């Protein structure tokens, strides 16, 4: 059989290429050649195992990226130690691609905006939301520190080929309805365990019409479905995005027309309202207008995270914020996904718009998303967030409540002081 044999999904095509095989099938164990390895602070836990297994050199220093992002600049002694371990490791092993303080950003955004992952790649990272880079038409997935140690030494990784869930989307997203609303709706269908160790492949006319940042949002939150990876087949939009920034050659692959999927979900988004994931799970999804009618007060709003803190998200938020004020009693934190996005916001007056309205515009980091740096909630407080998780304890105390929504909905909620439908401001 050839590599283009009938019946192969996108994930199967990419993993067959990585393994040097004509064809792979779900459940098969393959040894894949890794195209890109990424580490953030958790990667510091890789250094010990790397040396313990007798490794001295990284298999290909040009295929390894380190980006510190969770505590930037270091906010605790522990974080400072992690940063020092990574800096020392990079210096000792000759790793040139280190995004340190001043050049930093959320690791997935750093990979995306600098062209480190391209179509056909097998990419791995020490963060569960590495799935986001599957929007490039790659298999991108999170792995643990010991697995990463082996990857750094050998450039290879054992993987089980996942079955694929196909999500086909048709219809036009209405005004004020975004890719975040779409992925929340998909989460409501698949649930948080429905795609466990599966690939989720997004397709259909609606997906083909999305920008790369919107596709990143879709693939990012396949992590909350339990997926091994989320993917969108590469097309002209992918090529245009990567033009001039791709760090290595592309190997664009497409699913076969008769690919065999474990399950297909067909969605029509025509007339779909904005969506919101209510506490305490990303799959506790309801139409946002229904929740807005309940007048749920908020104490904090957060516009940030690897899911929704790109320049397009911040521009959209600033347009709604212009001339408005953050509601009394609400803390509004805005955190761009990378230093380059911060600079764009500075040049375009976006920072001024938010700060004049009463928001806090921070440096680039994971910020309030993971409950370990800034923006931690008090017990029983409520946050409207553009991030990806709202499990108990995600932003600090387990009693705090987080509502997940689009950037536009976060801004609308910050202005109104309660969970709000952004279409009211459009």
Image (cartoon, rainbow, N blue to C red):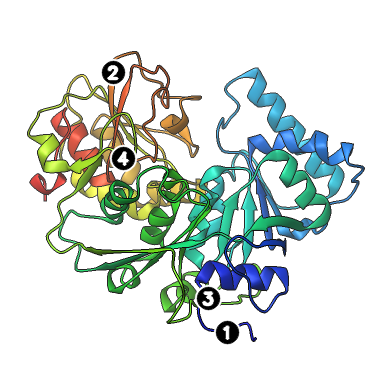
Which of the two discs, 2 and 4, labels the residue nearer the N terminus? 4
x and y, in percent, of residue 347 in the image: 39, 51
Quarter-of-image position of residue 295: top left
Asked if disc 3 and disc 1 are in contact, CB closer than 8 Å, the reply is yes
Give the class, few, some or many, for how many residues have Cα within 10 Å of label 2's Cα (few <14, many ≥20). some
The mark found on residue 352 in the picture is 4
Of marks 1 and 4, the one in the foreground: 1
**Residue assigned mark 1:** 4
Give the class, few, some or many, for how many residues have Cα within 10 Å of label 1's Cα (few <14, many ≥20). some
Cα distance, mark 4 to mark 3?
Answer: 50 Å
Q: Secondary structure at mark 2?
A: loop
Asked if disc 4 and disc 3 are in contact, CB closer than 8 Å, the reply is no
Residue at (33, 48) in percent of width and height: 187
**Residue assigned mark 2:** 381
Cα distance, mark 2 to mark 4?
Answer: 27 Å
Which of the two discs, 2 and 1, labels the residue nearer the N terminus? 1
Q: Secondary structure at mark 4?
A: helix
Of marks 2 and 1, the one in the foreground: 1
Give the class, few, some or many, for how many residues have Cα within 10 Å of label 3's Cα (few <14, many ≥20). many
Quarter-of-image position of residue 39: top right
Cα distance, mark 1 to mark 4?
Answer: 52 Å
Which of the two discs, 3 and 2, labels the residue nearer the N terminus? 3
Q: Nearer the viewer, residue 104 or 35?
A: 35
**Residue assigned mark 3:** 8
Cα distance, mark 3 to mark 2?
Answer: 48 Å
């Amino acid at each position: 059989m050839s590599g283009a044999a009938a019946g192969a999904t996108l994930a199967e095509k990419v993993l067959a290429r990585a393994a040097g095989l004509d064809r792979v099938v779900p459940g098969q164990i393959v040894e894949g050649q890794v195209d890109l390895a990424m580490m953030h602070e958790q990667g510091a836990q890789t250094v010990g195992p790397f040396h313990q297994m007798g490794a001295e050199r990284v298999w290909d220093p040009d295929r390894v990226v380190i980006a510190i992002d969770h505590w930037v600049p270091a906010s605790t002694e522990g974080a400072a130690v992690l940063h020092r371990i990574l800096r020392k490791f990079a210096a000792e092993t000759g790793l040139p691609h280190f995004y340190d303080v001043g050049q930093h950003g959320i690791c997935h955004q750093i990979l995306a905006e600098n062209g480190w992952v391209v179509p056909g790649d097998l990419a791995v990272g020490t963060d569960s939301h590495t799935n986001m880079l599957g929007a490039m038409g790659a298999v991108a997935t999170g792995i643990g520190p010991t697995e990463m140690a082996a990857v750094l030494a050998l450039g290879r990784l054992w993987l089980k080929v996942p079955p694929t869930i196909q999500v086909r989307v048709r219809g036009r997203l209405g005004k004020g309805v975004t890719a975040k609303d779409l992925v929340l709706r998909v989460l409501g269908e698949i649930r948080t365990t429905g795609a466990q160790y599966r690939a989720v492949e997004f397709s259909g006319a609606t997906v083909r019409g999305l920008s790369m940042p919107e596709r990143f949002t879709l693939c990012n939150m396949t992590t909350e479905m339990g997926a091994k990876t989320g993917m969108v087949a590469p097309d002209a939009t992918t090529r245009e995005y990567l033009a001039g920034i791709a760090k290595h050659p592309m190997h664009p692959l497409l699913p076969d027309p008769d690919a065999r999927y474990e399950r297909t979900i067909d969605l029509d988004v025509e007339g779909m309202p904005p969506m919101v994931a209510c506490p305490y799970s990303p799959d506790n999804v309801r139409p946002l207008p229904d929740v807005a009618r309940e007048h749920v007060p908020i104490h904090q709003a957060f516009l940030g995270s690897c899911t929704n803190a790109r320049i397009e998200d911040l521009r959209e938020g600033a347009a709604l914020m212009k001339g408005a004020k953050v509601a009394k009693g609400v803390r509004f934190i805005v955190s761009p996904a990378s230093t380059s996005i911060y600079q764009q916001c500075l040049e375009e007056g976006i920072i001024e718009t938010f700060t004049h309205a009463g928001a806090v515009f921070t440096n680039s980091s994971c910020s309030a998303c993971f409950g370990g740096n800034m923006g931690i909630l008090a017990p029983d407080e409520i946050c409207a967030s553009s991030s990806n998780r709202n499990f108990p304890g995600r932003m600090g105390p387990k009693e705090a409540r987080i509502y997940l929504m689009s950037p536009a909905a976060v801004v609308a909620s910050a202005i109104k002081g309660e969970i709000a439908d952004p279409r009211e401001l459009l």
